[in-house]
């Protein structure tokens, strides 16, 4: 309604609005602005040994020491990743969607494994194959005895791992972009005499440029903020250094916290600049097909036989790189610990001990005494630490994902009601605020700022013991708000304004309209956002590592730590096997979630009713057969 | 039944409606007709309560409802997009308003089935999702949903605009039948003059936030009150100076004549001005043929019934008859 009569005094609605505004301001200031501002100011409030304030001390120290090296390393990684990820990402999309490559469906499945197999699980999977006693390294060193067994570490290892880990976005978004191309434009170019390669270069690629630009910026930011790969593969970039400094004390080195803060701020500055560029570019608009009768893209056969063979070889080499770790992890998760330790498949003997059950372990001490360690061999679902990690990650991720959805749904409803007003834009800007800041800055700020009694959280220290779990939930929620906002806002655009008018005309109050008309429409998207956020958080490593608390050991942290004490004095004998089983479990969970989101969640009411009807008919037929 | 008195609606500084006065009678099919942005939907939304006027009043059966909340006006609406709730079945859509009124389940069931029968929706359709229905069936659901709460009047905002031409004509007739069967006062918004002429008891022609004319279809077509109405409703020829002089009409006014009032090769001896002309081109419509004839120093459009015999070819010489009584004149 464009204009309503104003009622005098404060009614219940006005009180709710005031309460909502105060709560929103409390959350935004208390959990976004103040902690991050504290980090920023800590850079300039350092004190020298005499206790005098020296605003530039940290910056001087930073420039004089080895710190710029971390920034340069991160930049180098980000720049190289932009090239390698785009090369591989564009390749996999063109090979499966544009060119006629035999077995494209299987290739696509292989290339998309990173959707269910990423983060710490992927890095440890690669380590399983490529590190000093990895399967491939052992095999290669048999062929080339002089080769450097430590080849899979440092920059090249991080670059290799992240190149293949970061193509998920290409597999999703670039694929959609290429599928959106109107084939008539390709035919028109061919008709005017353009050769296939020229068509690809001059007609197809320009339409993909906006998507590619977004993907490039996101890849650059991912490279800059890389955490799990550099940590596990030993590369000195910004994020692992921030985590190290955050855990250090002034007794060991100068200004550790202030330096960590400065690194976070540098990271934030890069992110803000890149996202501003991206935002500016996105506002310029995208290439849209002007065709009213768009033709579906037909795969292009590579005419040159040599090029065709080379393209096939390239496609299947990439497939092997993607699939080998996944297949090996699955196979080895069903092997006993001796087979896993020796990285040799024992085809004759399979076991589910890495998943379920416990076994005792007998070992010989250095004094030659035979000892038994009870229950030292255990499966993912019978190992107390692993179960604890799964349980904790499950609860933290579920609560945070639900909170993010709840906040965003309420906020987006408000934003849409006030879309032409400044207050609507202000709420949206506040929710997008965490997008500008690297995750590490937010988590680091929380860790430092809330590691004291804070009045506005009722005088609690949120980093103290079990409280850290609340802090992790808040961090998880805050970090996921921008993604949730973008997705759920897009869903709200699908609601026809007339639906709201219709509901009101039929007598529904704004709350009933929201609950019974608008929410059911956006619910599939909200559930999808919940599932995707849950999926990402369940195996999240970076934030868990930043908080570094024994009360907040998430599942990914457990997976990483599992192998550190493998076999020591008979403890955790099958840690590597359990890690493989964990990875398979994660893939299973992610696979189910993606199926629910993109498979089940994408169906509308009509499709659901149709399927229900078919199932009923099937049951009826079955019953009929049984009765007969 | 419904009366709008001196209604003024503003959006910021922009005045969308200027002193609108309309009286819709009980049981009448009343149409707001006009081009896009003329204020017809704004007027409808003022009646339904989605827009509150800056000044003026809306009254229904003598009772002022200007400030009555939307849900308490007892007005049914059929939206342009139908606004059917996509997450509900057909039955739930129709029952929505009844559930809000907290009616008992058996009563809701009975009312839903009764209204579905009246709008000719088969029982098996009730359990379907609205996305599983055709455009025509969706429109029936929208009408059933609007009527089931037994509103005093029903407002329809271009409900046929989303349909293809053939279905539009078919549903137009059904709408009229339903309106007659239910005997409900109907306010209908459209920009389609043919729709307005075939459906309405009376039409209000809107232009730039004003009402140019209110009248029966015959009045607005044959006795258009203003030059805008004459031009907007149907096709028309504007007569140039040479013909105006020949007809001895006032040269200070603008003169128009409908296409079907011009006569080709027909001298009835009734004082019509006869002009020699040449067929420039023809458009074949099946039922009739439209000719472009150069006569009296201008090109005039003429419609002739297609009898299959008297079909003129481009370049053919003809005589064009114009009777002064058929000319509509407006101040310049």
Image: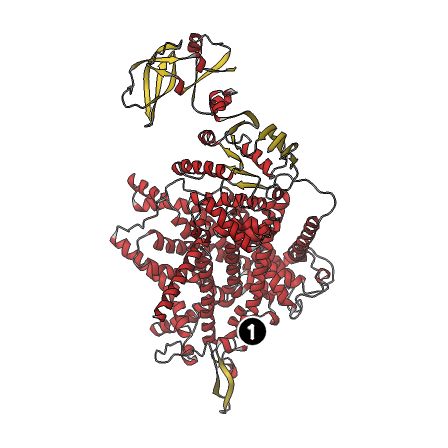
Q: Is residue A120 above or below residue B295?
A: below
Measured from the top left, where is residue A534 in percent x and y?
A: 53, 62
* Element carrying mark 1: helix
Give A449 or B136, whichever is nearer the viewer: B136
Give A133 or A442, whichever is nearer the viewer: A442
Give A180 or B303, whichever is nearer the viewer: B303
- Describe residue B139's horizontal placement relative to residue A481 as left or right: left
**Chain to which mark 1 belongs:** A
- Describe residue A482's horizontal placement relative to residue A601 as left or right: right
Residue A604 seen in the current view:
no
Q: Is residue B280 above or below residue A29?
A: above
Measured from the top left, where is residue A184 in percent x and y?
A: 33, 42
Q: How many marks?
A: 1
Residue depicted at x 36% and y 71%: A626
Q: Quadrant of residue A603?
A: bottom left
Measured from the top left, where is residue A523 in percent x and y?
A: 52, 55
What colour scheme has been applied to the protein in the rendered image?
secondary structure
Q: Is residue A580 above or below residue A593?
A: below
The residue identified by callout 1 is A388
How many residues crowd around disc 1 within 10 Å: few (fewer than 14), some, or many (20 or more)? some
Q: Quadrant of the N terminus of chain A?
A: top right
Q: Quadrant of residue A50?
A: bottom right
Residue B318 seen in the current view:
yes
Residue depicted at x 55% and y 47%: A276
Q: Quadrant of residue A165?
A: bottom left
Give A313 or A323, whichever is nearer the viewer: A323
Measured from the top left, where is residue A279 in percent x and y?
A: 53, 46
- Describe residue B145's horizontal placement relative to residue A460 as left or right: left
Q: Quadrant of the C terminus of chain A?
A: bottom left
């Amino acid at each position: 309604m464009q204009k309503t009569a104003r009622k005098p005094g404060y009614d219940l609605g006005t009180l709710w609005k005031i309460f909502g505004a105060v709560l929103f301001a409390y959350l935004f200031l208390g959990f976004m602005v103040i902690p991050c501002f504290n980090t920023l100011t800590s850079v300039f409030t350092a004190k020298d040994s005499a206790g005098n304030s020296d605003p530039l001390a940290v910056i001087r120290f930073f420039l004089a020491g080895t710190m710029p090296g971390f920034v340069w390393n991160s930049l180098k990684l980000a720049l190289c990743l932009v090239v390698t990820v785009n090369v591989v990402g564009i390749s996999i999309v063109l090979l499966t969607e544009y060119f006629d490559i035999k077995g494209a469906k299987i290739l696509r499945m292989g290339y998309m494994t990173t959707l269910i197999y990423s983060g710490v699980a992927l890095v440890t999977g690669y380590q399983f194959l490529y590190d000093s006693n990895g399967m491939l390294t052992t095999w290669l060193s048999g062929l080339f005895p002089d080769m450097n067994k430590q080849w899979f570490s440092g920059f090249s290892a991080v670059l290799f791992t992240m190149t293949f880990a970061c193509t998920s976005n290409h597999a999703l978004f670039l694929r959609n972009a290429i599928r959106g191309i109107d084939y008539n434009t390709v035919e028109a170019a061919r008709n005017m005499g353009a050769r296939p390669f020229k068509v690809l270069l001059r007609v197809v690629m320009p339409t993909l440029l906006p998507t590619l630009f977004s993907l490039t910026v996101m890849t650059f930011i991912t490279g800059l903020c890389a955490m799990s790969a550099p940590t596990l593969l030993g590369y000195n970039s910004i994020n692992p250094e921030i985590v190290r400094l955050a855990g250090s004390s002034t007794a060991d080195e100068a200004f550790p916290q202030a330096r960590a803060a400065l690194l976070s701020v540098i990271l934030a500055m890069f992110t803000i600049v890149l996202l501003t560029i991206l935002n500016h570019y996105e506002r310029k608009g995208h290439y849209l097909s002007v065709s009213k009768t768009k033709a579906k893209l037909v795969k292009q056969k590579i005419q040159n036989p040599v090029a065709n063979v080379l393209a096939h070889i390239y496609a299947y080499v990439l497939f092997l790189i993607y699939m080998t770790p996944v297949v090996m992890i699955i196979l080895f998760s069903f092997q006993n610990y001796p087979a896993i330790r020796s990285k040799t498949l024992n085809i004759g003997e399979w076991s589910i001990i890495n998943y379920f059950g416990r076994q005792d372990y007998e070992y010989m001490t250095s004094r030659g005494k035979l000892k038994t360690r009870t229950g030292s061999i255990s499966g993912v679902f019978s190992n107390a630490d692993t179960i604890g990690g799964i349980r904790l990650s499950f609860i933290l991720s579920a609560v945070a994902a639900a909170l993010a959805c709840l906040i965003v749904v309420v906020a987006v409803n408000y934003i849409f009601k006030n879309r032409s007003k400044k207050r609507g834009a202000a709420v949206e800007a506040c929710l997008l605020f965490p997008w500008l800041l690297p995750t590490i800055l937010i988590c680091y700020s929380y860790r430092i700022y809330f590691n004291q009694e804070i009045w506005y959280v009722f005088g609690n220290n949120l980093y103290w013991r079990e409280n850290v779990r609340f802090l992790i939930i808040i961090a998880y929620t805050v970090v996921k708000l921008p993604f949730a906002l973008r997705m759920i806002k897009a869903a709200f655009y699908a609601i026809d304004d007339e639906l709201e008018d219709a509901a009101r005309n039929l007598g529904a109050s704004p709350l009933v309209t929201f609950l019974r008309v608008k929410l059911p429409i956006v619910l599939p998207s909200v559930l999808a956002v919940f599932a995707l956020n849950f999926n990402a958080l369940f195996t999240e490593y970076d934030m868990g590592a930043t908080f570094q608390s024994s009360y907040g050991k998430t599942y990914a942290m457990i997976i990483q730590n599992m192998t550190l004490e493998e076999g020591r004095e008979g403890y955790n004998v099958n840690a590597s096997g359990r890690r493989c089983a964990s990875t398979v479990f994660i893939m299973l969970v992610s696979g189910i979630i993606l199926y629910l989101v993109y498979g089940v969640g994408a169906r509308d009411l009509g499709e659901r009713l149709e399927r229900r009807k078919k199932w009923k008919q099937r049951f009826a037929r079955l019953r009929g057969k049984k009765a007969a | 039944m419904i009366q709008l008195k001196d209604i003024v609606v503003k959006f910021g500084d922009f005045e969308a409606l200027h002193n609108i006065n309309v009286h819709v009678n009980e049981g009448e099919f009343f149409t707001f007709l006009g081009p896009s942005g003329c204020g017809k939907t704004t007027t409808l939304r003022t009646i339904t309560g989605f827009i509150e006027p800056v000044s003026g009043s809306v009254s229904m059966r003598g009772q002022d409802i200007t400030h009555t909340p939307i849900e308490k006006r007892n007005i049914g609406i059929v939206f342009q997009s139908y606004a059917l709730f996509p997450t509900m079945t057909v039955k739930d859509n129709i029952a929505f308003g009844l559930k809000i009124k907290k009616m008992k389940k058996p009563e809701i069931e009975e009312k839903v089935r009764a209204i579905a029968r009246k709008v000719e929706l088969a029982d098996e359709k009730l359990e379907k999702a609205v996305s599983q229905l055709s455009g025509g069936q969706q429109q029936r659901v929208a009408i059933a949903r609007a009527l089931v709460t037994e509103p005093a009047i029903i407002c329809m905002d271009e409900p046929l605009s989303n349909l293809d031409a053939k279905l539009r004509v078919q549903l137009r007739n059904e709408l009229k039948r339903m309106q007659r069967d239910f005997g409900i006062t109907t306010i209908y918004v459209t920009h389609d003059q043919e729709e307005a002429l075939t459906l309405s008891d009376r039409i209000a022609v809107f232009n730039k936030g004003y009402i140019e004319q209110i009248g029966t279809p015959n009045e607005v077509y044959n006795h258009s009150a203003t030059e805008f109405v004459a031009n907007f409703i149907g096709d028309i020829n504007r007569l140039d100076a040479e013909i105006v002089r020949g007809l001895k009409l006032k040269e200070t006014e603008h003169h128009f004549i409908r296409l079907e009032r011009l006569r080709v090769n027909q001298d009835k001896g009734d004082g019509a001005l006869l002009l020699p002309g040449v067929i420039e081109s023809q458009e074949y419509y099946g039922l009739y043929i439209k000719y472009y004839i150069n006569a009296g120093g201008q090109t005039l459009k003429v419609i002739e019934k297609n009898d299959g015999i008297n079909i003129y070819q481009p370049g053919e010489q003809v005589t064009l008859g114009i009777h002064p009584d058929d000319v509509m004149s407006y101040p310049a």
